[in-house]
Amino acid sequence: MSIVHQLASGWLLDHLSFINKINYHYHQQHELHCSKNKPTSVCFDALQMDSLSCFDASAPCITLDSTRNPENDDEGNCEMFTEKYVFRPELFNITKPYITAPIHKEHQQSNEKEGPMNGVKKEISTSVIGKKRKRCVAFNQGELDAMEYHTKIRQLIFDGSFQLIQEGLRSGFLYPLVENQDKCSGKPIILPLESCSLSELCEMAKYLPSLNNMELETLQLMEDDTSVTEQDLFSRVVENKFSFSKMITLMGQKYLLPPKSSFLLSDISCMQPLLNCRKKFDLIVIDPPWQNKSVKRSNRYSYLSSLQIKQIPIPELAAPHCLVVTWVTNRQKHLRFVKEELYPSWSVEMLAEWHWVKITTSGEFVFPLDSLHKKPYEVLILGRVQEKTALPLRNTDVKVLPIPDHKLIVSVPCVLHSHKPPLAEVLKDYIKTDGECLELFARNLQPGWTSWGNEVLKYQHMDYFMTVES
């Protein structure tokens, strides 16, 4: 379970635990002392999922099984090496806020006299008093709209987050800052180099003449396959139907695939293979690359215009009464677009507005709540596809709860750009059991989900994982 605590205000999630409960195990069977003139080779590679135990960093996770395989006695002995891979924990080690709000000396002295539980509320409520803006104080209309929106939801964010943070501190999931500093190594986080740009590969692949003209079936990986051709990856949905995980190689780079997962790696202009599967989804989560000033300056990723986002074929992908969840930045222009233009164009009725609140491992907001630069929260807009004909929402034997408004999802964020928290467990009560789930503009895969994007394998790269030794 990624849900650590659930209250009326929302959920406290453990994103890292969700990833590591997939429990990647890597098995290599090596032939040793072969009598024939054959080089030592890997006989079988697979990443098997152990669903019986949760991640425990203190447990021995690399084992050696040197049991002889009778079938190979004529050629020599075989030894099985098992390595356990987990997501690099330092990528979630957010111990301090990205920006610390100024605190007056008197206020700081009063906080030092308080215990950690009483101090949390004052820590997260501190505003950016005295922070100087680099430009004129005059605000444009967009900034004024954002300030008005923040004023409306501020108390909701503050009260709900505080309740969940206190639960996390009581249970030990979150640690007071002093105690947490002892657990932190203090070493800087070194991110893996992106030696293979998936988005650039997709940009080149879309010019291949065969991609949009072929109606290829879903490529189901075989049990002993560890690689697929680049042509297959860019032209069809790839599925790992097994209950254990797999590893594939693309342009010399290795990626881990969770069990029961499917994906399409393509540019937005090459989504036809996803439609060719003729699969209808009960839940569609969308994380569009919204345009903003920082993206323009940094050139970190290509963004889409509002018109391009509207052209995403949600009506063709959605099952009746599909739940659609869209991640939106705090820019009011984008929020209004989703509510007033995007959802109506897809025949989606907006039902609720939730917020993802980002905190440190000690329970502070990653940005001051009243920061004029960045807010410590993002928005999710939830809605359902409306059918043209009057049909019941669900069969009488299928119970789906109504979607509540103004819920919070509180979690420690990943340092990787736009690595959103998992929504599978949070949303399971609002879709039918064993419903089909799809994530658009994904950068990682989830068991039981179909994922699409031009960087859909990005955070499945081996560099983001590590072996855990005893």
Image (cartoon, rainbow, N blue to C red):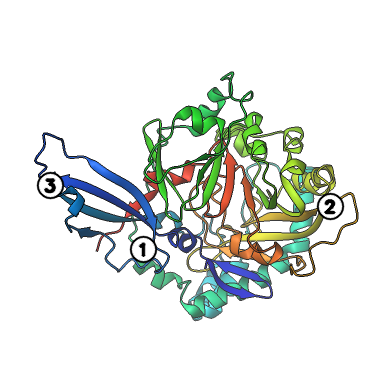
Q: Is residue 49 left or right of residue 327?
A: left
Question: Which amino acid type is marked by label 3?
Answer: Gly
Marked residue nearer the N-terminal end (3 or 1): 3
Q: Which residue, given by chain and number where applicable, does mark 1 sit on? A: 184
**Dot 2 crowding, Cα within 10 Å, few <14, some 14–19, many 20+:** some
Question: Which amino acid type is marked by label 2?
Answer: Gln
Q: Which residue, given by chain and number where applicable, does mark 2 sit on? A: 386
Q: Quadrant of residue 89?
A: bottom left
Q: Taking 361 as reference, is 283 above or below it?
A: above
**Gap in angstroms between the C-alphas marked 2 and 1:** 49 Å
Question: Which amino acid type is marked by label 1?
Answer: Cys
Looking at the rendering, in which quadrant would you find the C terminus? bottom left
Marked residue nearer the N-terminal end (2 or 3): 3
Q: Which residue, given by chain and number where applicable, does mark 3 sit on? A: 76
Q: Taking 180 as reference, is 217 above or below it?
A: above
**Gap in angstroms between the C-alphas marked 2 and 3:** 64 Å
Picture coordinates of residue 107 (x, y %)?
56, 72
